[in-house]
Image (cartoon, grey):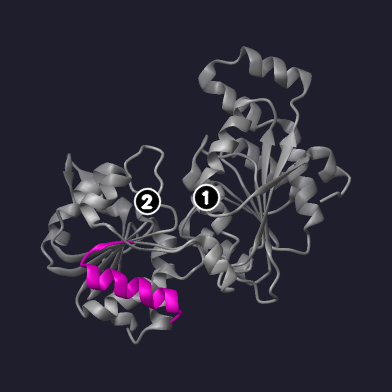
């Protein structure tokens, strides 16, 4: 275990319950495993989706002396209760005839420890729902304790105070996350797009500027420039990312992609069989892609600081050859897209990251 992981686990254990904040790629799962070693009790791990559940399971089998029979998955696909049970939030909140179908099952167990993975992402009703589950200890794990709904306090009131936090740049200096070059690429709307933008209803303006055709051209040019790297192209709007996937001839993962297919594609990307992968916001969190070194963000959830940090986090795992990461954010100038980008970057600016600004023409001429 790394020193900061040890300190995080001890800070949590001596404090009772609470939240540990560590950068993406800094090994939060190891902190969870260390907390389990302290607790020596039945443990419920709540995660965002089935892919994350299986990543936790694989990591626990690799890093601990737990065996397969001791770890259960409770998701849409499987219903296993074991000494260590990994459940998805979705299955926890499934209702049948207006009643939470699985509440009795979970509440009927005296869990010694509940671990909330990606605790910052949970909707407030799920907090209140899971707070009723009997447990002696609660551990929240997150990289970004910022919520656009301002409900950070809800996390602390239901789980406990922040027990450990370390700046991203400090972990980078220790060599445990990759250094990152953050680049904002400014694109200009065409006259036709500018007219559409000016006449659009306020609530539709972001979509108009976020899906400008120039962004697609820039994303494709960047992907080709980095053809020897492991590249993620991330976007909010399905028609936009579908087009990019088709034009580049590369696979895409989105909300309706079956879990089995997602796992096959993620594994192919990890193994280097796929060099470029287009993903929707389903890949914002809990996806472990260690060799991804380039992220190209074409659109997002408005001004979400949390999402910006999570997306950068996808490429921060230290690389085998020691190279750094590069995060491109494509932004339509003089629009709400630019305003949202400023807000999105606030959390990372507080962590010591700065964005250099280039023009789309710099991409087309290879001046990167």
Left or right, 57 with respect to 134, comes to right
| Circles 1 and 2 in contact, beta carbons < 8 Å | no
Q: Which one is earlier in the sequence, the residue at label 1 or at label 2? A: 2
Badge 2, how many Cα within 10 Å: few under 14, some, many 20+?
Answer: many
Left or right, 81 with respect to 349, comes to left
Q: Disc 1 to disc 2, how far (Cα)?
A: 17 Å
- Decide if residue 57 is in sight here: no
**Based on the displayed image, in which of its 4 quarters is residue 57 positioned?**
bottom left
Badge 1, how many Cα within 10 Å: few under 14, some, many 20+?
Answer: few
**Range of the magenta residues?**
1-19
The quarter of the image holding the N terminus is: bottom left
Query: Residue 57 bears which disc, if any?
Result: none
- Residue in the image at 51% along x and 21% along y: 203
Q: Name the residue under label 1.
A: 350
**Above or below — where is 220 with respect to 352?**
above
Q: Which of 344 and 243 is in front in this view?
A: 344
Nearer to us: label 1 or label 2: 1
Left or right, 272 with respect to 305, comes to right
In the rendered image, residue 12 lying in the magenta stretch gets the answer yes
Q: Nearer the viewer, residue 206 or 150?
A: 150
- Decide if residue 235 is in sight here: yes
Q: Mark 2 points at which residue?
A: 120
**Above or below — where is 165 with respect to 206?**
below
Name of the residue lying farthest toward the right: 365
Tell me where residue 22 appears, x and y as whole percent: 44, 63
């Amino acid at each position: 275990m790394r020193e900061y992981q040890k300190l995080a686990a001890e800070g949590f254990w001596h404090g009772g319950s609470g939240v540990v904040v560590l950068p993406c790629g800094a090994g939060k799962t190891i902190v969870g495993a260390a907390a389990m070693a302290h607790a020596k009790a039945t443990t419920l791990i709540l995660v965002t989706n089935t892919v994350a559940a299986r990543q936790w399971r694989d990591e626990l089998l690799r890093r601990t002396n737990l065996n397969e029979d001791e770890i259960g998955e409770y998701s849409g696909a499987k219903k296993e209760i074991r000494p260590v049970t990994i459940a998805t939030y979705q299955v926890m909140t499934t209702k049948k005839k207006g009643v939470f179908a699985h509440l009795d099952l979970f509440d009927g167990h005296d869990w010694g420890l509940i671990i909330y993975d990606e605790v910052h992402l949970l909707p407030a009703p799920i907090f209140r729902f899971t707070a009723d589950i009997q447990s002696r200890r609660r551990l929240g794990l997150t990289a970004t304790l910022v919520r656009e709904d301002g409900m950070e306090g809800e996390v602390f009131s239901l789980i406990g105070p922040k027990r450990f936090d370390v700046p991203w740049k400090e972990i980078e200096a220790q060599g445990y996350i990759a250094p990152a070059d953050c680049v904002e690429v400014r694109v200009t709307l065409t006259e036709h797009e500018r007219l559409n933008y000016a006449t659009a209803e306020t609530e539709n303006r972001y979509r108009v500027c976020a899906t400008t055709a120039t962004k697609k051209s820039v994303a494709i040019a960047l992907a080709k420039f980095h053809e020897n790297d492991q590249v993620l192209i991330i976007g909010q709007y399905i028609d936009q990312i579908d087009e990019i996937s088709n034009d580049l001839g590369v696979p895409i993962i989105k909300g309706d992609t079956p879990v089995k297919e997602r796992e096959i594609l993620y594994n192919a990307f990890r193994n280097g069989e796929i060099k470029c992968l287009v993903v929707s916001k389903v890949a914002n969190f809990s996806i472990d892609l260690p060799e991804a070194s380039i992220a190209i963000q074409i659109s997002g959830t408005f001004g979400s600081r949390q999402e910006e940090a999570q997306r950068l986090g996808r490429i921060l795992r230290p690389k085998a050859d020691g190279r750094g990461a590069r995060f491109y954010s494509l932004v339509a100038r003089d629009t709400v897209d630019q305003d949202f980008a400023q807000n999105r970057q606030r959390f990372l600016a507080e962590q010591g990251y700065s964005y250099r600004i280039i023009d789309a023409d710099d991409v087309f001429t290879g001046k990167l």
